[in-house]
Image (cartoon, rainbow, N blue to C red):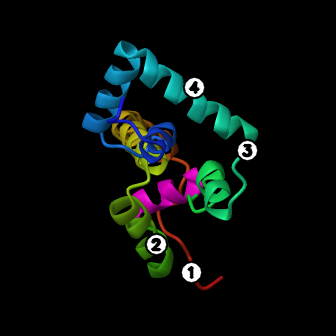
Amino acid sequence: MSELNRALLHAYLDDALDEAETARVEQLVRTSDAARQALLAAMQERDRGEHSLGAIWRREHLTCPKREQLSSYLLGVLDDELTDYLKFHLETVGCRVCTANLADLEALQREARPESSERRRRYFTSSAGLLPATRDTKK
């Protein structure tokens, strides 16, 4: 049980540990009554409410971009300042919530490519006879 401390348990609850450390904590909690009790105590401490500014920012993900911003980031259409912030948030801070959101959006893009290509082809094919052959740009 000496391997678990308050900071480690709170990092576990925040999902701020790497995979190996998360697995280690979970293994300790599964196999040790003392570790399980320590985790329950940390959860109860959380339920009573930690009201520091840092805790509120972490809990509410106040620094996280919206999903639409992440989508725009993938498309490369954000201004330089916001792009730099998102790179920092994803690569330096390593926000797991935003990284998961980004991975989900990337997967959706990969899945949608064949559909969107087919849809685009159908639009062009179906509207080919509706467009005038020449356009008079002087009018």
Amino acid type assigned to the residue bearing label 1 in the image? Thr
> Percent position (x, y) of residue 88?
39, 69
* Label 1: how many Cα within 10 Å (few below 14, some 14–19, many 20+): few
Measure the alpha-carbon separation of dots 1 and 4.
73 Å
To which residue does mark 3 refer?
49
User: What kind of element bears circle 1?
Assistant: loop
Amino acid type assigned to the residue bearing label 2 in the image? Tyr
Amino acid type assigned to the residue bearing label 4 in the image? Leu
**Near-viewer residue (45 or 92):** 45
Q: Which mark is residue 137?
A: 1
Q: Is residue 124 visible?
A: no
To which residue does mark 2 refer?
85
> Looking at the image, do the residues carrying marks 1 and 3 touch, with CB atoms under 8 Å apart?
no
* Label 3: how many Cα within 10 Å (few below 14, some 14–19, many 20+): few
Q: State the residue at coordinates (49%, 60%).
A: 72
Q: Which residues are magenta?
A: 66-76
Measure the alpha-carbon separation of dots 4 and 3.
14 Å
On the picture, is 19 further left or further right than 76?
Answer: left
